[in-house]
Amino acid sequence: MRIRRQFTCLLVSALVPGLAHATPYDGVYRQVANADCALIGVDGGSIEIRDGLFHGVETQCRMANPVNVVDMDATLYDMECAGEGAQWTERAMVMHSADRQGIIMVWNGYAFRYDRCEIPE
C-alpha cells in the first residue's frame, strides 16, 4: 500500500510539472503607494506571487514555462490566466527592480512596478 501511494505521488508530480514551485519573485506587492497589503486581488490592494501563481485584481495566472532572459535579471513566463469568467494565455516578463525592493512586470504594451509589502510576522 505504501509503495502504491509513493508511486502515485511520483506519477502525479511527473505529470504536473511546476505545479507548486516557488519563483524568485514570490511575495506580496503594493499596487499603489498606500495600498493595504492585507487586501490581495482587489483594486487599490496588493498582488501576490506564490508558488508559481500570480494573484492579480480578480485574476489568477499560473506562471508556466519560465525562460531566463539573457543578460538580464528577468524571467519570461507563459501566463495561463482565469478571471471574470474568461480564460486566456499571455506572455509576461518579471524582474526585480534595480533597488530589489520590488518587481517590474511587463505585459505586451504595459509595464508595472510593484513595491514589496512589509508584512509583520
Image: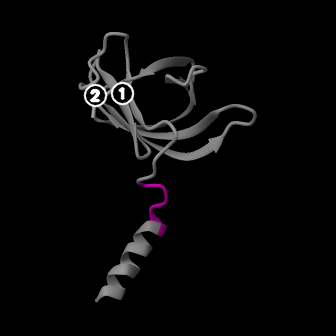
Q: Main secondary structure of the magenta part?
A: loop
How far across and how far down the image is residue 87, in percent?
Answer: 38, 39
Q: Tell me if 68 is positioned left or right of 105 in this view.
A: right
How far across and how far down the image is residue 86, in percent?
Answer: 34, 35
Number of marks drawn: 2
Q: Please tell me how crowded label 2 is: few (under 14), some (14-19), or many (20+) other residues with Cα within 10 Å.
A: many
Looking at the rendered structure, the secondary structure element under dot 2 is: loop
Q: Residue at x 37, y 10 (%)?
A: 33
**Quadrant placement of the N terminus:** bottom left
Tell me which numbered mark, 1 or 2, is placed earlier along the sequence.
Answer: 2
Q: Residue at x 33, y 23 (%)?
A: 46
Q: Is residue 18 magenta?
A: yes
**Residue reaching furthest to the right:** 71
Q: Find disc 1 in the rendering and name its residue.
A: 47
Q: Residue at x 37, y 77 (%)?
A: 8
Q: Tell me if 41 is positioned left or right of 10 in this view.
A: left
Magenta segment: 14-19
How far across and how far down the image is residue 64, in percent?
Answer: 51, 46
Q: Tell me if 48 is positioned left or right of 22 in this view.
A: left
Q: Mark 1 to mark 2: distance in Å? A: 5 Å
Q: Residue at x 58, y 45 (%)?
A: 66
Q: Find disc 2 in the rendering and name its residue.
A: 40
Q: Nearer the viewer, residue 111 or 117?
A: 117
Q: Are marks 1 and 2 in contact (CB under 8 Å)?
A: yes
**Quadrant placement of the C terminus:** top left
**Residue reaching furthest to the front:** 121
Looking at the rendered structure, the secondary structure element under dot 1 is: strand
Q: Does 44 appear above or below 96? A: above
Tag 2: amino acid: Ile
Q: Please tell me how crowded label 1 is: few (under 14), some (14-19), or many (20+) other residues with Cα within 10 Å.
A: many
Q: How is the image coloured?
A: one colour
